[in-house]
Amino acid sequence: MVLLLPTLVFAAKAMTAVADVCPVNHTDIRVTQKIDQPHLDYSKSTAELKSMKFSEPVTDQGFAETTGLTVHSIAVDSEIRIASSGSEGAPTCVWPTVVTVTLSTAPTIYIASDGGDCRRIVALGHENQHAAIDRDIIARYIPVFRRRLADMVDAMNAAAPEASLDTDSRRSRIEEKINAMIAVTSEVMNADQAAQQRELDSPEEYRRRTDACPAYIVDPKNGASRL
């Protein structure tokens, strides 16, 4: 019995050594942007723009007249490439080789076809600010995504392989962790984006737009005329 104890200790050390045989592999983190110039659409009237439905309106129709509207979002697309290595009887090493995240936006700006040149110009200037906010958000969150993903994959690559999981399960576990990190970061980014867009659509901003152009009345016989 006394002679078995060193043998067991040696076996435990050997198992630990086998579990740590995977090298610290490098993962290429690629976070890029794809920004399309706003598409301008002058085909809808003020009434048609006002009737467009959105899940979360950002303007109060009590003080805002819909002469312009921007349909926009920030899309987050990702691709994860995973490699594995190992020989018969040895633990298989599984790691992400490339993680690619692309932040993109392709806004459409609607400007009312009625209301006069002044209102259209002022509305376009305002709607361009909405598109600019999205571009700024993307620029600010590219390093955030890159840093968070790098920290996560560095920790995963440095960890010993889980002996209880097969190769496919390890691949799935890696994908789940990375996708969860991307989803959480996307939620934070979207909340930041929404807050800035609401701040732009303030009562003061719409009063400024209203005051920037002469007021008009519509005469059924003579059309629009300035007050």
Image (cartoon, rainbow, N blue to C red):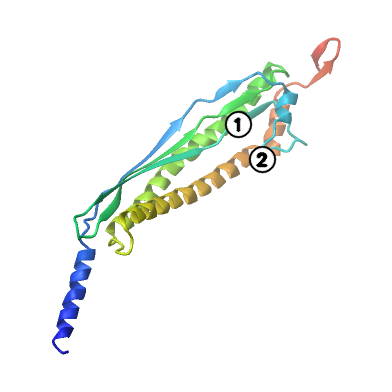
Q: Residue at x 43, y 49 (%)?
A: 179
Amino acid identity at mark 1: Val
Per the model, the C-alpha gap separating discs 2 and 1 is: 12 Å
Q: Are marks 2 and 1 in contact (CB under 8 Å)?
A: no
Percent from the top left, x then y, of residue 40?
58, 21
Q: Is residue 90 left or right of residue 33?
A: left
Question: Relative to residue 160, is residue 126 depicted above or below?
Answer: above
Please give the residue where the numbered disc 1 appears in the rendered image. 71
- Furthest residue in direction front, as rendered: 88
Percent from the top left, x then y, of residue 168?
34, 53
Please give the residue where the numbered disc 2 appears in the rendered image. 55
Amino acid identity at mark 2: Ser
Give residue 210's quadrant in the image.
top right
Local crowd size for mark 2, using a 10 Å CA cut-off: few (<14), some (14–19), many (≥20): few
Give residue 91's quadrant in the image.
bottom left
* Helix, strand or loop for disc 1: strand
Q: Is residue 217 left or right of residue 173?
A: right
Question: Relative to residue 74, is residue 95 depicted above or below?
Answer: below
